[in-house]
Amino acid sequence: MASNYDTVQQYLDRLRKDCIEADQELNNAKAQEAFKKSALDKKKRWSEVLKDILSTITETNRLGLIYLGTLERTRKYNEKAGKNARLCIDAIRILICEAKQLLDCAEVLRAQIKVLTDRIDNKIPSKGANSILANLTALKSAGEESVTAIRDAINALLVTCRHEEELWGLLAGEKGLVYQVTGAYTLVTEGKKPDLEDCASCHPQKTPLFPMDDEACDFYTKTKHQYDSTLDELKELQKDVEVVSCKREFAQARKDALDKAYAAALAAKSCETAPAAARK
């Protein structure tokens, strides 16, 4: 009986030792699983951050390209309008020159009418509305009106020419709209206006800002590469989590089995020792 008792006790001791080892193995498996899951959660949050950044860059790029297209079309339209304004200025100046020549002719005609009128005045008797003197008087009045009208036309042309020159200056002048739009386009694409000199405190963009999804845009390229790498790391972490979860499940199953075996062995030992004690 002593030998059997020692064998049972040895079996119980071995089971107890196995239970302790299984418990330690389960705790280690749980710790590894928690560590991998924590790393997976952190990587998921980081991937979401990168995803939002890329989404923002993509939307910014879309709006930026629309803005650049608008600037380019505006520049072309204003260049054309400025060219038309310059042609209008040239045309108005030609009209002014022609009007001045016409004014000179009208002045000469008026002077000649005056000379003729002065010569025949009081020499030819007036014989009604259709007389020579009456016609000369009407011609003289018409000449005066034509001179006045031509002068008014010249003044209006001068005013129009001045306004057209102002319009040309606003459109295509030194600091006109074409210059401003071109500067805005350069500022958006290069990060620096063309009329600003480099200084020690500024660092102009070395690569084009737009399009942002171009390989030349280092920020987009690095972010996209980092996001892709994060997705690959997520896949690997997910596999690691599955592996350690399986290990934890196996460790849990082993511990549960050993605990049940140990409990059953203790119960069997109790049943074996109870009759022996009663016989004594």
Image (cartoon, helix red, strand yellow):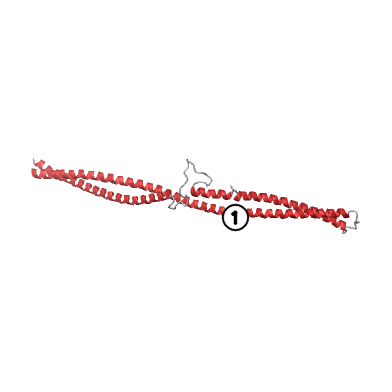
| Circle 1 residue | 80
Query: Which x, y percent locates residue 270?
Result: 15, 43
Q: Quadrant of residue 112?
A: bottom right
- Viewed as shown, does residue 110 lie left or right of 223? right
Query: Which x, y percent locates residue 265?
Result: 16, 45
* Residue 218 seen in the current view: yes
Q: Quadrant of residue 116?
A: bottom right
- Viewed as shown, does residue 174 lie left or right of 265? right
Label 1: element kind: helix
Tell me which residue sits at (32%, 47%) in the image: 37
- Viewed as shown, does residue 185 lie left or right of 97? left
- Viewed as shown, does residue 137 lie left or right of 200? right
Tell me which residue sits at (31%, 46%) in the image: 36
Nearer to the camera, 126 or 257: 126
Nearer to the camera, 3 or 166: 166
Nearer to the camera, 243 or 162: 162
Query: Which x, y percent locates residue 280?
Result: 8, 40
